[in-house]
Image (cartoon, rainbow, N blue to C red):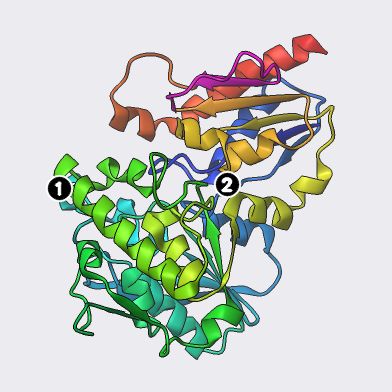
């Protein structure tokens, strides 16, 4: 069996459309092979699309929400609801895709809208809210969202901190007495990357793409270190080094440490929901991919999770390849779908066409190998 299981090609093609494009290319050169589609997400872009795909026919409905965008302006977004269970994609509220290159500034962007969305859904009677993290424009450790949920960040004079993550450098105490008690029982956070909060592989790895300068990164490092120190003293437990805590600018850390809600890998969540985790056998071929393959892709994102499951070959079709597959990994191959040097904007517009073409060639190779 050939399993087609890509994630989103960011800003170009969602996981479902990508799966269909790859399948179309394969079928043009593979006539008899069984091909199964399993679009996936790590919790970031394409999360709700995948939820809709796997829960179709289960009375799933869209619920409109009005929340704050990364700069505090009003934004209309949606959640998916099944009975009393709701699914949120944080990227639709505070994602980088909402901002132009010039607007990106993690010293000013806030996660407040995410907290507003969670509260709104709970107030509408949801018994479970599952939040997919990823693709955020923020590095505020969840400060904005947590303040909406009732947590207070105070300075040495017991005054609330001002706006922005750099205010954490003045943090003296965290007051959780006003926390909405529903959060711990009814909210689950899905992290998209396995980065810890701090350190060389921490949240600041993503700071440049969110608009941070070198000077900004120094300020953020100081502030987040203080945040982790005071928070961990308050809960008497260390979490900043745990994998996944750096997701979405540290939102995962803030929620895990200060609300006690459940957290897990978004990729693993989708693999379980789809049933793919239990379906794969060692003789199966997996064709996956994403817009840019990097070190994070090979860890706990979709590609990394697929690598750990049974299969004979894993073929990755990517727009850009920024990491080499280790020579000892004989089962994995990464191929660029681009036909040659091309403008990024134009390449993104032709992602579907390139996927079909690359998949057709892969199909010929697989056919000749049988």
Element at badge 2? helix
Give the foreground label among 1 and 2. Answer: 1
Question: Earlier along the polypeptide chain: callout 1 or callout 2?
Answer: 2
Q: Position of residue 209 (x, y in %)?
A: 28, 42
Looking at the image, residue 322 lies above or below residue 306: above
In the image, is residue 165 part of the stretch drawn in magenta?
A: no
- The answer to whether residue 63 is left or right of residue 85 is left
Looking at the image, residue 275 lies above or below residue 78: above
- Residue at 30% x, 61% y: name it: 226
Q: Position of residue 262 (x, y in %)?
A: 60, 69
Give me the disc on residue 102: 1
Q: Which residues are magenta?
A: 320-336
Element at badge 1? helix
Whether residue 139 is visible, yes or no, is no
- Residue at 36% x, 73% y: name it: 145
Crowd rating for badge 1 (residues with CA inside 10 Å; few <14, some 14–19, many 20+): few
In the image, is residue 324 part of the stretch drawn in magenta?
A: yes
Between residue 252 and residue 115, name the one nearer to us: 252
Q: Which residue is mark 2?
A: 16
Give me the disc on residue 151: none
- Residue at 48% x, 28% y: name it: 353
């Amino acid at each position: 069996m050939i399993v087609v299981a890509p994630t989103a090609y960011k800003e170009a093609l969602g996981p479902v459309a990508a799966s269909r494009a790859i399948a179309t290319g394969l079928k043009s050169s593979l006539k008899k092979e069984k091909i199964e589609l399993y679009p996936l997400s790590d919790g970031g872009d394409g999360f709700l699309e995948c939820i809709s795909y796997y829960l179709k026919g289960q009375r799933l409905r869209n619920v409109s929400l009005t929340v704050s965008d990364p700069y505090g302006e009003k934004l209309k977004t949606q959640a998916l609801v099944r009975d009393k269970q709701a699914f949120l994609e944080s990227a639709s509220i505070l994602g980088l895709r909402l901002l132009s290159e010039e607007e990106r500034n993690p010293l000013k962007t806030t996660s407040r809208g995410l907290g507003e969305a969670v509260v709104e859904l709970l107030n509408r009677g949801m018994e479970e809210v599952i939040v997919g993290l990823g693709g955020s424009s923020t590095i505020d450790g969840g400060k904005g969202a947590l303040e909406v949920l009732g947590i207070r960040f105070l300075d040495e004079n017991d005054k609330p901190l001002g706006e922005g993550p750099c205010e954490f450098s003045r943090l003296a105490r965290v007051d959780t007495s006003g926390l909405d008690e529903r959060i711990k029982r009814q909210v689950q956070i899905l992290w998209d990357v396995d980065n810890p909060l701090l350190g060389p592989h921490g949240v600041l790895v993503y700071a440049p793409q969110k608009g941070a300068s070198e000077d900004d990164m120094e300020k953020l490092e100081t502030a987040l270190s203080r945040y982790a120190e005071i928070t961990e003293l308050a809960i008497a437990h260390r979490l900043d080094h745990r994998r996944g805590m750096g997701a979405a600018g540290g939102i995962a850390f803030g929620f895990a440490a200060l609300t006690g809600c459940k957290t897990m890998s978004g990729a693993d969540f989708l693999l379980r929901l789809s049933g793919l985790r239990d379906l794969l056998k060692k003789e199966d071929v997996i064709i996956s991919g994403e817009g840019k393959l990097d070190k994070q892709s090979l860890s706990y994102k979709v590609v990394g999770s697929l690598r750990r499951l049974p299969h004979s070959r894993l073929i990755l079709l990517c727009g850009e390849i920024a990491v080499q597959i280790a020579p000892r990994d004989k089962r994995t191959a990464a191929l660029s779908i681009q036909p040659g040097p091309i403008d990024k904007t134009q390449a993104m517009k032709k992602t579907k066409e390139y996927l079909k073409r690359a998949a057709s060639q892969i199909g010929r190779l697989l056919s000749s190998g049988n």
